Amino acid sequence: MLAFLQFAVILDFMIMSPLGAVIMPALNISPSQFGLVVSAYAFSAAASGLLTAGFADRFDRKRLLLFFYTGFILGTVWCGLAQSFESLLAARIVTGLFGGVIGSVVLAIATDLFPVQMRGRVMGFIQTAFAASQVLGIPIGLFLSNHWNWHVPFLAMAALGLVGGLIVAWKMQPVAEHLKAPREHSAFLHLRNTVTEPRYLIAFATVALLTTGGFMLMPFSSAFAVNNLGIGLDLLPVVYLVTGISTIFVGPMIGRAADKFGKFRIFTFGTVLSIVMVVIYTHLGPVSLITLVIVNAVLFAGIFSRMIPFQALVSTVPAPTQRGSFNAISASIQQLSGGIASVVAGHIVVLAPDGRLQHFEVIGYVVVVTSIGAWLLVRRLNRNLMSA
């Protein structure tokens, strides 16, 4: 159930990019306006994480999850009904305000319900939602928009999401064990204590660095594949499909390996693999489809080999009474750093007259530096946890 909710939220965020080619002419908006629509979700989600962090541990997590999930579904319906730039922008802001908190509540629930020895497998399973959104969501969304219009994918997501929400409301038991422990009377004091806790600052900094890589590479990946690598637009879905399928299988395997061999060891393996593949990927020239598929699949295996063990490791950092606020702040930092990384990448990459992206390898070097920085922080975090 948690993986499905994660799938719905990730799909809602990711589907905006491939639908851009349909939405811009339909609403007669410019690329800069569409960019604002996309970034509005990230920044409103970041603001929402900070605003709710003080209250995140004061309620039954199931009720908190259903409250924000209901707002997310309504925001998605609004996206499907929008008929103008202003309406769509407002809808994305509302969707971000509610959807940006769901992932943090999901992680808090997973941490509450599962012991640390199982969290690698749990996080690996939940992270398959990202791969599933590539395999199922994006192709289906494009199919619906091509056969009807761009409104239909959002309305279909809302309908599917509603079914998932009803199942959660019916089947999931209350998650309120953390309410039995004493806590601060003031929500602001709770937020301040979480933000200023020295043990948490390393984790927050690591989240920012880990997010940088994906948000610098992802926005330009399709343009790089088409214009620099010579892959046809009609073949791009194949790249996403195969990469997603491979990640669905690899994710749970990484989770089990993290539980068996140690979360930091697998994180180190993922860091090395990611660095090697990022350098290879950003220096590619014209290649065959199968070469790009293999490089992409191995690159994502490296990325997931970092994210899954890190999430399992960092789940042991916050106290039970601060898990909600910790994850909400972490999600907020993730959105903010991702938005900033996209802006920075946009200033590094230059579009040549022939459509090729120049200086793409510079982004690769930046990602390598942030990956090394993240590894150093995680090593320190792991040492602190081992000595605690």
Image (cartoon, rainbow, N blue to C red):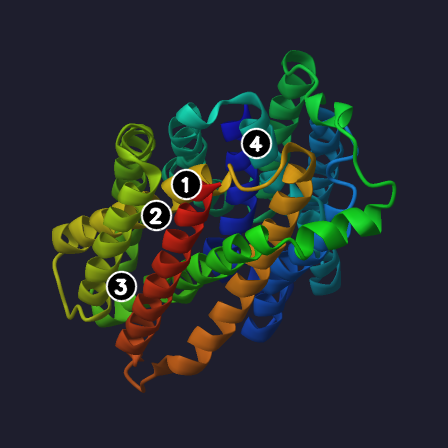
- Decide: is 24 above or below 100: below
Question: Counting other residues with Cα less than 10 Å from the Cα at mark 1, is it few (<14), some (14-19), or many (20 or more)?
Answer: few
Toward the viewer: 381 or 366?
Answer: 381
The answer to whether 88 appears left or right of 205 in the picture is right
Give coordinates of residue 255: x percent, y percent: 34, 32
Toward the viewer: 193 or 222?
Answer: 193
The answer to whether the residues at label 2 and label 3 have Cβ atoms under 8 Å apart is no
* Front label number (1 vs 2): 1
Question: Counting other residues with Cα less than 10 Å from the Cα at mark 3, is it few (<14), some (14-19), or many (20 or more)?
Answer: many
- Hey, which residue is sitting farthest bottom in the picture? 353
Give coordinates of residue 183: x percent, y percent: 79, 36
The residues bearing labels 1 and 2 have C-alpha atoms spaced at a distance of 19 Å
* Front label number (4 vs 2): 2
Which amino acid type is shown beneath numbered disc 2? Arg
The residues bearing labels 4 and 3 have C-alpha atoms spaced at a distance of 30 Å
- Check residue 311 in the rendering and tell me which mark sits there, or answer none: none
Ranked by sequence position, the earlier of labels 1 and 2 is 2
* Front label number (4 vs 3): 4
For numbered disc 3, what is the local secondary structure? Answer: helix
The residues bearing labels 3 and 1 have C-alpha atoms spaced at a distance of 43 Å
Question: Counting other residues with Cα less than 10 Å from the Cα at mark 4, is it few (<14), some (14-19), or many (20 or more)?
Answer: many
Toward the viewer: 20 or 366?
Answer: 366
Ranked by sequence position, the earlier of labels 4 and 2 is 4
For numbered disc 1, what is the local secondary structure? Answer: helix
Which amino acid type is shown beneath numbered disc 3? Ala
Which amino acid type is shown beneath numbered disc 4? Leu
Quarter of the image for residue 277 reads: bottom left
The answer to whether the residues at label 1 and label 2 have Cβ atoms under 8 Å apart is no
